[in-house]
């Protein structure tokens, strides 16, 4: 499976929109005071900004109403839309991050069982680090890795367990795609590709004739941060995409 690194244009776009809204809000506040026919607020009297607040000596109801209308609309948008959506997005992101973490832990455990490797909890935790994972399974010319693949080949219950873990992850990704408005095209495409690749590994006849090989490649790419095209990755691309939600 080929994971393409995401661009950051979506995040930049959202930052620009947020900055623009902040500037417009500041402008609306200033024009609200400037266009009002009410006396200047006490603590602003005598200050350097007071002369600018008398730009319209007799007030301007059109500018005032537009400014107040924008501020009220922005307030209710923040209250009714932005903050609830942000909270929901945070919950969904944390659930996906938790599911991905459990996926990694559980699939590593299945690989250890398949390779007939009995290790303590600390070693299993250490294998979550891609460097330790590679070192552990690359030892003696990948003897443990090939033992894991052979174990999967001999006992299909472990393959079923792997596919179940993958299905849990794909289900969580589908939920994210349905519930979160992902504005970045590359990020949206990434999650769709991940979900579709898992579905293919489970169901496509193209992969069924040598399923262990393709499952092994999929897991190695995730746990060892390895790309067939680009080689070693510095970051966990899935984790990076989750954090960007």
Image (tube, rainbow, N blue to C red):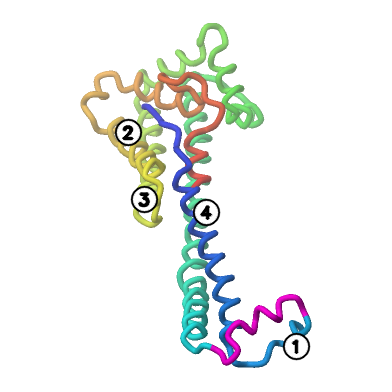
Mark closest to the chain's N terminus, 1 or 4: 4
Crowd rating for badge 1 (residues with CA inside 10 Å; few <14, some 14–19, many 20+): few
The label nearer to you, 4 versus 3, is: 4
The label nearer to you, 4 versus 2, is: 4
Residue range in magenta is 47-59
State the residue position of label 3: 177
Mark closest to the chain's N terminus, 4 or 2: 4
Closer to the camera, 175 or 143? 175
Label 2 SS: helix
- C-alpha span from label 4 to label 2: 32 Å
The label nearer to you, 1 versus 4, is: 1
Closer to the camera, 139 or 117? 139
State the residue position of label 4: 15
User: Do tag 2 and tag 1 residues touch (Cβ < 8 Å)?
Assistant: no
- C-alpha span from label 4 to label 3: 22 Å
* Location of residue 111 in the rendering, given as x and y in whole percent from the top left corner: 48, 25
Judge from the rendering whether residue 16 lies leftward or rightward of residue 135; answer left or right. left
Label 1 SS: helix
* Residue 84 seen in render: yes
Mark closest to the chain's N terminus, 3 or 2: 3
**Which residue extends farthest left?**
205
State the residue position of label 2: 197
Q: Residue at x 35, y 48 (%)?
A: 174
């Amino acid at each position: 499976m080929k994971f393409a690194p995401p661009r950051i244009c979506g995040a930049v776009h959202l930052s620009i929109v947020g900055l623009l809204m902040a500037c417009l809000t500041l402008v609306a506040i200033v024009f609200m005071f400037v266009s009002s026919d009410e006396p200047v607020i006490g603590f602003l009297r005598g200050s350097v900004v007071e002369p600018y607040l008398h730009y319209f000596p007799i007030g301007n109801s059109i500018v005032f109403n537009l400014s107040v209308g924008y501020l009220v609309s922005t307030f209710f948008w923040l209250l009714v839309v932005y903050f609830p959506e942000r909270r929901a997005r945070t919950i969904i992101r944390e659930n996906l991050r938790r599911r991905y973490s459990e996926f990694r832990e559980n699939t590593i455990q299945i690989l250890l069982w398949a390779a007939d490797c009995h290790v303590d909890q600390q070693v299993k935790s250490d294998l979550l680090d891609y460097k330790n994972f590679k070192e552990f399974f690359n030892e003696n010319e990948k003897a443990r890795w090939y033992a894991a693949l052979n174990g999967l080949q001999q006992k299909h219950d472990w393959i079923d367990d792997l596919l179940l873990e993958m299905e849990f992850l794909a289900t969580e990704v589908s939920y994210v795609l349905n519930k979160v408005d992902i504005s970045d095209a590359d990020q949206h495409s990434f999650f769709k590709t991940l979900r579709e690749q898992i579905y293919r590994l489970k169901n496509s006849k193209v992969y069924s004739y040598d399923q262990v090989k393709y499952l092994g490649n999929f897991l190695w790419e995730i746990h060892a941060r390895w790309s067939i095209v680009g080689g070693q990755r510095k970051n966990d691309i899935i984790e990076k995409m989750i954090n960007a939600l």
